[in-house]
Amino acid sequence: MSRLSHHTPSPPLLSQLAVGDAALAARLERDLRLTAEALRRYVTDAAPADVAEVVLYLFADAAKRLRPLLVLLGAEFGTDRPGADRSGAEAPTAGRRDIIDAAVVAEMIHVASLYHDDVIDQATTRRGSASANARWGNANAVRAGNWLLAKAAWISAGLGLTAVSLHAEAAEALVSGQLVELLGPEEDAASISHYLTVAAGKSATLISTSLRLGAILAGAPEAAVAAVGDYGTHLGIAFQISDDLLDVTGDPTRLGKEPGKDLALGVASLPILLALADRGPSAEEFRALLGQPSLRRHALTLLRRSDAMDAARTMLEERLVRARSALAALPRSPSRTVLDALCDVVARRDH
Ligand code: FPP
Ligand code: MG
């Protein structure tokens, strides 16, 4: 994938988490690698080379893989834990192979939604590189997304009814999140609760189902499945809010895109909604600038200085508090510590 010259790729998520427990770190690293290999094999075994090239295009960024990591971390709370292999050296057990397949499914659904999203948004870039639609056209990008969704459904079917049902829950949430976003709030006063509904559908549900599926496949008790699911819901919403904040304050070389994209595209991000809901004089000025493309830089400067940014940061912190408190229902363990550290990563994200 050829990178845009100004974009600095981010370090792998696992290294940002600084997993303190060596056995857990080795296991996660091994299984993320096995997930990437399995995913690539599923595609290359079933698709002709030119189709495979488009389908695999968005998987090239090794820094991501949040959802597979969450499947693996969810599995750590099971009784049928990741095999006897604690060194990370031996081959994974059959149960572990299912968990790796679940990680593949989570990543396939996520990436399928990105192929479709970039067509809908007419995006020209994704993660600092040309988007698939910009490179191969809309039809090929949609086909790649469809291929991934269909393959993910087959793999889920091999994992059993629970996996199929969680897969369906995630796909339905993604699609209805997009539709609810398109329809907009019923009234202006409901804009923040509408935003949260959209964020739950587009971001949080797949994050929550990834954790739950890993936990269920590993035989975790019901209370642990519920706890990782709740944690995922709050983390997912926090993740979306941090995305919105980055769009206002982010460094283009780290982000791989120019800040202010939400303003330019008329996206109802949380800081923008909070600024619009404010009744102060600078909010008035902000509102007046919104429809004027030539004054967008000024609108972004005003937004950066507005109280809306602090209010959005507070909402982000509140979500992270809720995510962390969901973790309290889980036994203390190195994997619980990693989930906690993930909240820190979201809190200090710069890309
Ligand atoms: C990114 O949002 C978009 C999503 C997270 C999900 C989009 C969902 C669909 C297109 C429905 C289709 C779903 C499936 C399962 C194929 P964004 O545009 O706000 O953020 P961006 O800056 O990453 O584009
Ligand atoms: Mg988009």
Image (cartoon, grey):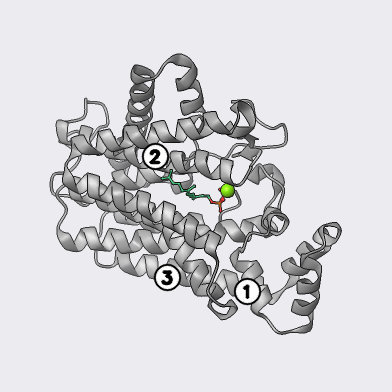
Coordinates of residue 119 in the picture (x, y in percent): 57, 41
Residue 69 bears which disc, if any?
none
Label 2 Cα neighbours within 10 Å, binned few <14 / some 14-19 / many ≥20: many
Helix, strand or loop status at disc 1? helix
Residue designated by label 3: 321
Disc 2 within 8 angstroms of ligand 1 (CB): no
Q: Nearer the viewer, mark 1 or mark 3?
A: 1
Helix, strand or loop status at disc 2? helix
Label 3 Cα neighbours within 10 Å, binned few <14 / some 14-19 / many ≥20: some
Residue 89 location, quadrant: top left
Instruction: Give left or right: position of 41 versus 86.
Output: right
The amino acid marked with disc number 3 is Val
Q: Nearer the viewer, residue 179 or 207?
A: 179
Q: Nearer the viewer, residue 191 or 6?
A: 191
Residue 309 location, quadrant: bottom right
Residue designated by label 1: 274
